[in-house]
Image: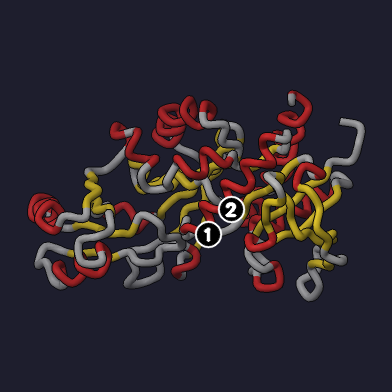
Amino acid sequence: MTATIKVGVIMDPIADIAYKKDSTLGMLWAAADRNWQLFYLEQPDLYLDNGRAYGLMAPLQVYRDASHWYELGERQARPLADLDVILMRKDPPVDQEFLDATHLLGFAEREGVLVVNPTTALRQCNEKLYAQCFPQCLPPSVVSCNEAVLRAFHAEHHDVIYKPLDGMGGTGIFRVGEDGRNLGAVIEQLTQGGKRQIMVQRYLPEISAGDTRILLIDGEPVPYGLARIPSAGEVRGNLAAGGRGVARDLTERDLWLVEQVKGSIKEQGLIFVGLDVIGDYITEINVTSPTCLREIDDQKGTDIAGQLMDAIEKRLTRA
């Protein structure tokens, strides 16, 4: 494309991000390196006016400076169709506000704006449930809100992980061992008394070697994954839960898992995806705001955000 690409980013407050590791900031740096124009929005800034999508957006400058990483210009109401691409980088939970935002962004898509990731996929591909489409890649798993079903899974597998369907960063995850201690309380709390569906999976002891994030751009894997190794006494490798990130080469099994899912990922139009892998199994497929690119770049000298911007530019050129 010859004209400057205009990029909108929808994210959590930029003033509150973790400068050293925030993946969205890395993406914004990569876009700025290409002299693309950046515009900043938060989720409540989206609105419809007579059936057309608008945003209260501020021109954004980003810097590689830990004490001053951004500047915002004056916020103005503009049609989202003024943008070429919108990075939807609002972190989960995928709650009603998030879903409403995807519907509003859908109006911009109809006017030709590229939303990364596409709004239909953001709604359809729940990060826990989407993985269930590939049972050959999963540890034994059940999704239910029924206490008897959830108890039966524990009785069969003895050491299991219970987790909500809409969490992130390891929040709300419980391990229940063979003694079944607090099993009833865990089920009651997570299902809200039998009203909310949750997931239970067999505990994978391979978590001690790390929960690996594998990043895919247009369905193709980055050659390194980030093994997020739990801190002492933890069962969660998530960096937000205190895990330590170590970049490693992908294994043959990792590449096999990628091959199982990449066709569907491409079919859904997903441009940037994160697979969570423990041992031989996928546990989640992250599509909302996958992270860990900065850690891999720092350790391996890659430019994952740059690769993503190249993929976005190719999509815009084909449009």
Q: Secondary structure at mark 2?
A: helix
Contact? badges 2 and 1 (CB < 8 Å): yes
Structural distance between the alpha carbons of marks 2 and 1: 6 Å
Instruction: Identify the residue at horizontal 9%, vertical 50% (top origin).
Output: 156
Relative depth, front residue between 171 and 97: 97
x, y percent for residue 208: 34, 58
Q: Can residue 103 be spotted in the picture?
A: yes
Relative depth, front residue between 123 and 175: 123
- Identify residue type, mark 2: Ala
- Identify residue type, mark 1: Glu
x, y percent for residue 277: 40, 46
Instruction: Identify the residue at horizontal 37%, vertical 63% (top origin).
Output: 236
Instruction: Identify the residue at horizontal 34%, vertical 45% (top origin).
Output: 279
**Is disc 2 surrounded by few (<14), some (14 to 19) or many (20+) residues within 10 Å?**
some
Quarter of the image where the N terminus is located: top right
x, y percent for residue 76: 83, 61
Q: In the image, 92: left or right of 2? A: left
Q: In the image, 242: left or right of 84? A: left
